[in-house]
């Protein structure tokens, strides 16, 4: 299969699993929703799918070409918004919860910093999975949700449910990317 098609398909699959987690979060709220959301990232990792927030911290460690990372991001964003929209059709009651979340977002430094912190959590969760334990996912996903950290792919799904766009989305993308790379930078091993 063509590499770009494979990347795209695995990005759409990842968006679907994260969308299911976001659906649970919007439908059930806290405290149950954040724990069920973790199933999305568990599925992404165990199925080998492409989630931008799970890949960006490994950009240099895994030698991921930047253009491939951007294709993954595009696939996640487009598919995420579409899945969110489809969920709003299937369950119109979700729109109220989605709109309330979107109204709380802002293009601001605090929002950006919460996105950076989500990037840190996502990197640690995936790193621990790669080292043989799903505990980083099981605890990390509820952590970022309970703390109000901003996850760009979950946010675009919420935007799809709300059938809108918000300029905080690029802020979340940049924050997730920077947070993931920062924790990778601080934790990398250097040659002595």
Image: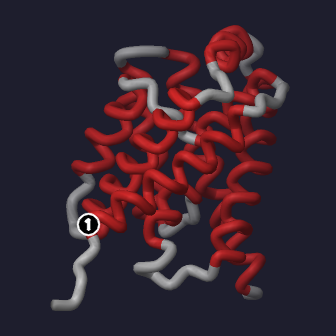
Does 163 appear above or below 49?
above
Farthest residue toward the bottom?
192
Q: Name the quadrant containing residue 144.
A: top left
| Image coordinates for residue 17, horizontal then vertical, percent | 56, 47
State the residue at coordinates (64%, 70%). Answer: 69
**Residue 175 shows up from this direction:** yes
Instruction: Specify how the rendered protein is coloured.
Output: secondary structure
Q: Name the quadrant containing residue 6.
A: bottom right
State the residue at coordinates (36%, 46%). Answer: 121
Q: Which quadrant, please, contains the C terminus?
A: bottom left
Q: Mark 1 points at which residue?
A: 187
| Image coordinates for residue 127, horizontal then vertical, percent | 31, 63
Q: 100 left or right of 130?
A: right
State the residue at coordinates (49%, 16%). Answer: 28
Q: Nearer the viewer, residue 126 or 190?
A: 190
| Image coordinates for residue 37, horizontal then vertical, percent | 45, 35
Q: Name the quadrant containing residue 52.
A: bottom right
Q: Residues within 10 Å of mark 1 (few under 14, many from 20)?
A: few
**Residue 9 shows up from this direction:** no
Q: Which of 34 and 61 is in front in this view?
A: 61
- Count of marks placed on residues: 1
């Amino acid at each position: 299969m063509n590499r770009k098609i494979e990347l795209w398909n695995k990005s759409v699959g990842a968006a679907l699993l994260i969308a299911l987690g976001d659906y649970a979060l919007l439908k059930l709220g806290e405290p149950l929703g954040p724990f069920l959301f973790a199933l999305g990232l568990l599925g992404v990792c165990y199925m080998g799918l492409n989630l931008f927030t799970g890949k960006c911290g490994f950009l240099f460690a895994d030698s991921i070409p930047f253009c491939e990372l951007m294709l993954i991001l595009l696939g996640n964003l487009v598919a995420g918004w579409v899945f969110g929209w489809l969920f709003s059709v299937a369950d119109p009651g979700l729109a109220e919860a989605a709109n309330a979340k979107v109204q709380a977002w802002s293009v601001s430094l605090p929002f950006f910093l919460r996105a950076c912190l989500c990037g840190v959590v996502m990197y640690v969760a995936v790193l621990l999975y790669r080292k043989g334990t799903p505990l980083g996912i099981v605890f990390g996903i509820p952590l970022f949700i309970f703390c109000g950290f901003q996850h760009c792919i979950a946010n675009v799904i919420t935007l799809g449910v709300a059938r809108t766009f918000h300029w905080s989305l690029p802020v979340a993308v940049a924050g997730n990317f920077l947070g993931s790379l920062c924790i990778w930078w601080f934790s990398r091993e250097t040659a002595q």
